[in-house]
Each structure stands twice: as C-alpha cells, then as structure tokens.
Image (tube, helix red, strand yellow):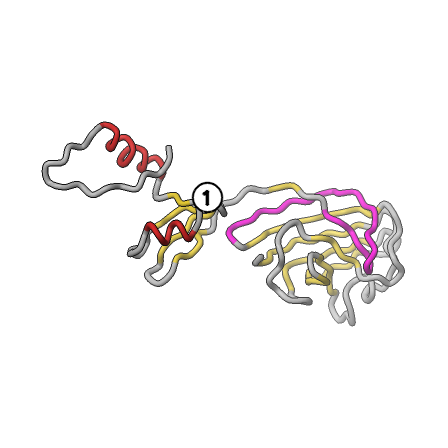
C-alpha cells in the first residue's frame, strides 16, 4: 500500500471506509510517510518533530529528523556481486575474479575482492584493484582496510589498503617507500599471483 497524507478531522465528520483504509490501514502498513524526493518531503512536512521518519523513493533511504536536520538512517543493505579489475601502473591486467562482493549502507560501502592474475603486469607498476561502486570521499593514501599480495614465486605481502587513484585500492607494507608493486615488494605481477583487499569507504 502507498502512503496517503492524512487529512484533519472536524467535529461531525464521518470516517468513511475509504479514508479509514487509506489513512489508517494503508499508512500503518506503509510504516511512515513516503516521498519521491527530499524536496517533496520538506514541502509536505513543514514542522517535523524529533524522531519523525520519512522514506525517500529516489534514493531508497529512510530519513529521520533529529531536531535540527533530516539525517539518513543507514539501511541494512544487500550484498552484491561485482567484478574487480586488476591493474598495474596504468595498465589493466587480465585476471580471474575469485571473489567480489560489496554492500552499501547509506553512504558507507563495505567491499571485499580477490583476483588471480592470468597475465603479466607492468614491471614495478603499482598493483591496484578497482572498487565496486561510488566515488570515494577519502583522499589518496587514506587507509581503508587490509590488502594482501601473494607473489607465487616468493612470498605473501600484507599491509594496509589505501587509495592509489580514483576508483582503485592498493596496499602499503610496513616500512615501504611506495605502494605494493613499486616498493615492498617491487615486482612484476605474474600469472597466478593473487591480490585481495577488504575495505570500508565513504561515498559522496
């Protein structure tokens, strides 16, 4: 059922079946007012009270008034599959998508990715893996989580996940002078090397 804006009742008014079904039953099932946009919400609710909620269909987000402003109420969200893109330097590298999943809660994205290289990368190029969605608010080198690089011919390298460029995550190992791939380890991605990350970031 849809939300119906309730009308005031005056003395002597008769509560018809239509009004009851729409304004009482329907609104109860709706769980609160529903508006297409925040503009429509603000036009309809000119004097909100603390704790009042309204759902916005344009963004599929619940909002709640805190006494000063309307704030987004983080939804539970749904895990969604994506295909991470492996890159070294500025060159995309073919890979197998072992795992790529993310969930959006308001403006917060939680994502995990794991890929296995099926081709060689650029020598000494920064190893990067794409994010699933949105434009990250954080700046370059902001730390967002964990990053793992498995050089099948040598060893495992673990470090913090950081923004390497817009839309891509790389890693910094302890004491490194640069992102993984360019430093600690300085290497060329080879077939069967594995790269993975787990991050949380804010989107605009």
Q: Is residue 172 above or below residue 103?
A: below
**Foreground: 137 or 142?**
137
Say whether residue 171 is left or right of residue 30: right
Q: Name the residue under label 1.
A: 57
Q: Position of residue 145 (x, y in %)?
A: 64, 59
**Foreground: 84 or 35?**
35
Q: Quadrant of residue 89?
A: bottom right
Question: Which of the image's four quarters has the N terminus?
Answer: top left
Q: Residue at 62%, 59% (x, y): give it.
A: 136
Q: Residue at 77%, 70% (x, y): give it.
A: 176
Specify the principal SS of the magenta part: strand
Asked if residue 121 lies in the magenta stretch, the reply is no
Q: Position of residue 186 (x, y in %)?
A: 85, 64
Q: Where is residue 75 in the image (x, y as percent from the top left)?
A: 47, 47
Farthest-out residue, left: 12
Q: Where is residue 138 in the image (x, y as percent from the top left)?
A: 61, 64
Asked if residue 98 lies in the magenta stretch, the reply is yes
Question: Which of the image's four quarters has the C terminus?
Answer: bottom right
Q: In which quarter of the image is residue 188?
A: bottom right
Q: Residue at 89%, 51% (x, y): give it.
A: 120
**Foreground: 139 or 45?**
45
Start-end of magenta stretch: 84-106
Q: How many residues crowd around disc 1 within 10 Å: few (fewer than 14), some, or many (20 or more)?
A: few
Numbered label tally = 1
Callout 1: helix, strand or loop?
A: loop
Say whether residue 88 is left or right of residue 17: right
Q: Residue at 81%, 65% (x, y): give it.
A: 184
Say whether residue 146 is left or right of residue 15: right
């Amino acid at each position: 059922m849809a939300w119906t804006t309730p009308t005031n009742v005056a003395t002597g008014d008769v509560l018809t079946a239509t009004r009851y079904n729409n304004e009482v039953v329907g609104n109860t099932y709706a769980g609160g007012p529903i508006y297409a946009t925040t503009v429509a919400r603000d036009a309809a609710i000119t004097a909100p009270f603390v704790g009042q909620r309204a759902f916005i269909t344009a963004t599929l987000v619940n909002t709640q008034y805190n006494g000063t402003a309307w704030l987004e109420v983080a939804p539970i969200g749904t895990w969604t599959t994506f295909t991470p893109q492996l890159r070294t330097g500025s060159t995309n590298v073919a890979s197998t998508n072992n795992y790529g999943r993310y969930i959006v809660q308001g403006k917060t994205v939680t994502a995990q990715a794991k890929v296995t290289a099926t081709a060689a990368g650029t020598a000494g190029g920064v190893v990067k893996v794409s994010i699933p969605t949105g434009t990250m608010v954080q700046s370059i080198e902001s730390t967002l989580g964990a990053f793992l690089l498995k050089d099948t011919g040598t060893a495992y390298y673990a470090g913090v996940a950081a923004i390497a460029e817009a839309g891509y995550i790389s890693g910094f190992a302890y004491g490194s002078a640069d992102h993984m791939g360019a430093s600690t380890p300085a290497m060329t991605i080879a077939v069967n090397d594995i790269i993975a990350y787990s991050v949380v970031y804010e989107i605009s």
